[in-house]
Amino acid sequence: VRIERDLLEKNNAVAKANRERARANRLSIFNLIGGPGAGKTALLEATIPRLGKRWGVSVLEGDQSTDNDARRIKEAGCTAFQINTGTGCHLDATMVANGLSELRPREGTIVFVENVGNLVCPALFDLGERAKIVVMSVTEGEDKPLKYPHIFRAAELFVLTKLDLQPLVALDEERCIGFARQVNPKIRTLRVSSRTGQGMDDFIAWIGETAAKATVMSETTP
Ligand SMILES: Nc1nc2c(ncn2[C@@H]2O[C@H](COP(=O)(O)OP(=O)(O)OP(=O)(O)O)[C@@H](O)[C@H]2O)c(=O)[nH]1
Ligand SMILES: [Mg+2]
């Protein structure tokens, strides 16, 4: 327990430095968290062209192994840097600090961090992000917000993905979203399909508004 507490305290100190660095550089960092295959990379692939010219975007990719996701993001036309965690089940603030030094995002841009596919450990680690976004697909079952409450509590936005598959799997959307609200009454929910583009406008609007707020905040606070 002691080791875990020390580890989290050290992480929080680095996360604070990341947040200060983000403020100084007017960066909006979004931390995407979801189970393996939830559709995090697909969501980013759909997001990159849609964010268009208004926002510069770059991506830090976290996986235990391979650079598959960084390659997909680069193919989508975006700068990306892959972090491999080996046996690790989450990204920590130090990995993100080092990743930012490699990525060198321009001032006033958006950085997406795709966390290691896992609904559990990433919830505990502050990376210095502007917001955590929990990504869950309709194929995962409506009770996930109750089974993995920590991430749904820590996230500002819940993106329910693969909506085009909904007719096949018959997930009870209202029940699922109700469970998410039960653990976090303030959570926003968006329903999207990266495949068909359904709901993507709302996601882009949320990202843009949240990033704009962060930019204004850092311009007005010394
Ligand atoms: N039909 C459909 N398939 C999707 C959608 N989004 C993702 N997929 C598929 O789901 C699978 C996993 O998608 P990824 O984007 O790789 O998922 P991920 O969350 O990044 O996975 P990890 O990084 O491995 O944790 C792929 O086969 C995607 O094509 C969607 O909106 N609709
Ligand atoms: Mg991925």
Image (spheres, rainbow, N blue to C red):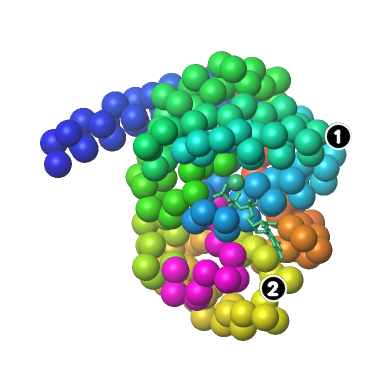
Residues at badges 1 and 2 in contact (C-beta under 8 Å)?
Answer: no
Tell me: is circle 1 under 8 Å from ligand 1: no
Q: Quadrant of the N terminus?
A: top left
Q: Is residue 52 left or right of residue 219?
A: right
Q: Residue at x 52, y 80 (%)?
A: 175
The answer to whether residue 8 shows anywhere in this view is: yes
Residue 167, horizontal then vertical, whole percent: 70, 81
The answer to whether residue 130 shows anywhere in this view is: no
Location of residue 183 with respect to 128 vertically, above or below: below
Residue 172, horizontal then vertical, whole percent: 57, 82
Q: Residue at x 44, y 51 (%)?
A: 118
123 within the magenta span: no
Q: Amino acid at mark 1?
A: Lys
Q: Residue at x 48, y 43 (%)?
A: 116
Residue located beneath label 2 in the image: 165
Secondary structure under badge 1?
Answer: loop
Query: Residue 194 falls in which quadrant of the image?
Result: bottom right
Q: Residue at x 84, y 39 (%)?
A: 52
Q: Which region of the structure is painted magenta?
A: 127-144
Q: Amino acid at mark 2?
A: Leu
Tell me: is circle 2 under 8 Å from ligand 1: yes
Q: CA distance from mark 1 to mark 2?
A: 31 Å
Residue located beneath label 1 in the image: 53
